[in-house]
Image (cartoon, rainbow, N blue to C red):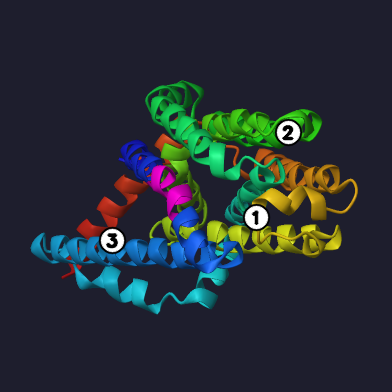
Amino acid sequence: MGVWGVRFNKIGSLIGNWIKAPLIAFVAARFGNPWSHFPVAVIYALIFLICNSHLANVYKRECLDKGFGSDTASVQKKLGFLETFKYIFMDKRLLFMVVADVFYFIANGIISNGSTYWWQLHGMYDTSFAFSATIVSICTWILTIIMPSIGFKLGKKNAKRLGYWLYALGPAILLVFGRYSCWVHTGTQVLAQVAYLVFAGFMAPIMIAEADRYYHETGKDLRSVAPSLLTLPSTIGMAVGAAIMNYGVAAIGLDQTDWTDISTITATMPEGFVNSYLLVWAGLTVATAVIGAVIWIFAYKMTDEESKQYALENIEHDKKLREEAEANA
């Protein structure tokens, strides 16, 4: 289910990349380049809100129709933002997993927020950005068929370790060769998708497996909480990554460049700005990605056989508890 969710997510990305650049250009022609991204972001946010609201309603109806008890719902309602942190700190391994994911998404936030500027600095945003995004999306869809199979063979632990190190390799290549062509960025984006897709379908099972281990060893049940932590690293990481990127490029003189006309960007750039930009953009991405990869080595140590054993023993344990409760009743 996780793998197919990733595949359809990439179909949506393909459609979005086809229309994003033309839509930004359309808005820029009427309101100017500095304001071109905000209206487009609002449109995408509204689509996201409408689709998720629909899915939430469908899920709610399915739960009610199939008679799922209200106990789960009542527990979920009590879990606010601060309570979620309490559950993370209960399991130190789970905490390290979340921290590693935060650094991964910080790297993601840095590289993605700087991508548009890189094409503009090369004077190719209007002509080639959409084409590049389409290439990446098509390659990604093909990779959604190939990479999960490789991930299954590697196992959850090794698949995510490989994915994190491959993700760090992309900006390292960009740091060395990116100054020569912005098409190197296209290649590193494809590599980033290779890295992500080798473990993307296992993100929820990895969290549940750790919760199973913790429940088996301590009796404290975090299995319903652990999958909900998947959104926490991306929320924190993308926001922090965007902020780091913005402060970084401001420090090297981004505001001195006139972005109102793409054709004059090069003329208003400070001397050596392109090289400085590459160091900030790719360099910070490499640093945060490597930190995330190193932390993940120590965060998750279970093999698939061990996680399966914990899950099966927990099922038997829960069955005995239900039988005892029914007998007492």
Measured in 3D between alpha carbons, the distance from the residue under mark 1 to the one under mark 2, in whole angstroms, is: 25 Å
Q: Which residues are magenta?
A: 16-23
Q: Nearer the viewer, mark 1 or mark 3?
A: 3
Q: Which residue is mark 1?
A: 99
Q: Which residue is mark 3?
A: 51
Note whether 244 is above or below 313 in the view shown.
below
Q: Secondary structure at mark 2?
A: helix
Look at the image and say whether residue 291 sits in the magenta stretch.
Answer: no
**Disc marking residue 174:** 2
Task: Determine whether label 2 and label 3 are within 8 Å by CB.
Answer: no
Residue type at mark 3: give it: Cys
Q: If you read the primary sequence from the N terminus, does the residue marked by circle 1 or circle 3 appear first?
A: 3
148 horizontally vs 91: left or right:
left
Task: Determine whether label 1 and label 3 are within 8 Å by CB.
Answer: no
Residue type at mark 2: give it: Leu
**Residue drawn at the location 35% of the way across and 77% of the way down:** 77
Look at the image and say whether residue 22 sits in the magenta stretch.
Answer: yes
Residue type at mark 1: give it: Val
